[in-house]
Amino acid sequence: GGLSGYLNNLYVRDGSRGKGLGTMLLEHLMKEAKKRGVVAMHIPVKPKNLKALEFYRNAGMDEELVMMERRLDRAGKEK
């Protein structure tokens, strides 16, 4: 039980990557969330975004959920 936090997007521009900014942002977010009583953070990541998956794994996060999607605003594969 307890509160859950959700982060939809964390993006660092290409020219600024590799300098620890993403890690600093994520750690700050986690500390603030914990102060507010959040016990678990959830961050959706596309399976093909291997750099993001590695980043979040290195930050101590585990894969817990696979989310399925079917776009309804595009033609094709209609049932």
Image (cartoon, grey):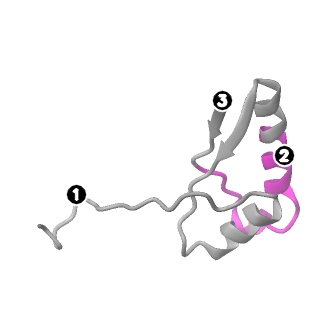
**Residue closest to the eye, 51 or 4:** 4
**Residue closest to the eye, 12 or 66:** 66
- Residue 74, given in percent of the width and then of the height, sits at 21, 64
Q: Give the answer, above or below, for where 42 lies relative to 60.
A: above
Q: CA distance from mark 3 to mark 2?
A: 18 Å
Q: Amino acid at mark 2?
A: Glu
Residue 16 among magenta residues: yes
Picture residue at 39% right of the left edge, 62% below the top: 68
Residue 29 location, quadrant: top right
Q: Amino acid at mark 1?
A: Leu
Disc 1 target residue:
72
Q: Secondary structure at mark 2?
A: helix
Determine contact: label 3, label 2, CB under 8 Å.
no
The quadrant of the rendering that contains the N terminus is: top right
Q: Seen in the image, is 70 located left or right of residue 12? A: left
Q: Give the answer, above or below, for where 6 lies relative to 73.
A: above
Q: Secondary structure at mark 3?
A: strand
Give the mark, 3 or 1, whose residue is nearer the N terminus. Answer: 3
Classify 10 Å Cα crowding around label 1: few (below 14), some (14-19), many (20 and above).
Answer: few
**Residue closest to the eye, 65 or 12:** 65
Q: Amino acid at mark 3?
A: Leu
What stretch of residues is rendered in magenta? 9-29
Picture residue at 64% right of the left edge, 35% below the top: 4
Picture residue at 59% right of the left edge, 72% below the top: 49
Residue extending farthest to the left is 79
Question: Which label number is shown at residue 3?
Answer: 3
Q: Seen in the image, is 32 located left or right of residue 77? A: right
